[in-house]
Image (cartoon, rainbow, N blue to C red):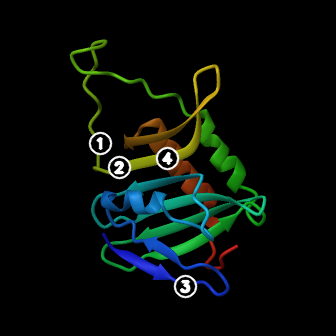
């Protein structure tokens, strides 16, 4: 797993995962902002020479903060930032995650008969993790992590979100 250390003036040191492979997913989810744990993360690990992108989400000083790590091939990771204070598209784009249909659990040979899953067209993997999900109508709290393939609702949400946020990314940490 490749890790780059980024020192920020007047701030804590952040370990910045290179997000080069799915092996880096736990590091991306574990990134800290001034010692604070993230509220969520999402990443797309693309096949071939296409860029791999991971985004870690924080609530910090009453604002949403997104930290993006992007790699292409063997290049060093590029780290950029977005804030709901300077990017009006950030909160609505992330709120779109709340509209994803729930996943249905299928246990082979134990539950309902499951259809064979669609095979991904290019081998890209889409990961979403949230620290505070709601389970059932009683609003029980829990963590939620999804791993999905091309064309799935999480993949479509992620591609749309990354396009919407494209003009928001800056090298300056909020």
The residue positioned farthest toward the bottom in the image shown: 9
Q: Earlier in the sequence, mark 1 or mark 2?
A: 1
Q: Which mark is residue 120?
A: 1
**Residue shown at 29% from the left, 32% from the top:** 118
Give the CA separation, mark 4 to mark 2.
13 Å
Residue 130 screen position, x and y as percent: 54, 45
Q: Which mark is residue 72?
A: none
Residue 168 screen position, x and y as percent: 66, 66
Q: Which mark is residue 129?
A: 4
Q: Earlier in the sequence, mark 4 or mark 1?
A: 1
Q: Earlier in the sequence, mark 3 or mark 4?
A: 3
Give the CA separation, mark 1 to mark 2.
8 Å
Q: Which mark is residue 125?
A: 2
| Horizontal arrangement in the rendering, residue 112 relative to residue 18 (left or right) | left
Q: Earlier in the sequence, mark 2 or mark 3?
A: 3
Quick check: marks 1 and 2 in contact, CB under 8 Å? Answer: yes
Of residues 170 and 147, the one drawn nearer to the viewer in this rendering = 147
């Amino acid at each position: 797993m490749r890790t780059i250390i980024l020192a920020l003036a007047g701030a804590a040191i952040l370990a910045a995962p290179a997000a080069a492979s799915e092996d880096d997913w736990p590091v991306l989810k574990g990134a800290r902002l001034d010692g604070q744990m993230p509220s969520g993360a999402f990443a797309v690990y693309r096949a071939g020479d296409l860029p791999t992108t991971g985004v870690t989400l924080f609530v910090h000083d009453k604002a949403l903060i997104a930290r993006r790590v992007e790699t292409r091939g063997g290049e060093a990771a590029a780290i950029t930032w977005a804030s709901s204070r300077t990017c009006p598209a950030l909160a609505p784009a992330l709120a779109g995650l709340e509209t994803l249909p729930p996943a249905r659990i299928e246990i082979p040979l134990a539950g309902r008969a499951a259809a064979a899953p669609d095979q991904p067209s290019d081998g890209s993997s889409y990961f979403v993790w949230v620290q505070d999900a709601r389970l059932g109508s009683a609003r029980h709290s829990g963590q939620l992590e999804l791993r999905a393939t091309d064309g799935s609702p999480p993949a479509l949400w992620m591609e749309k979100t990354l396009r919407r946020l494209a003009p928001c990314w800056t090298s300056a940490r909020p």
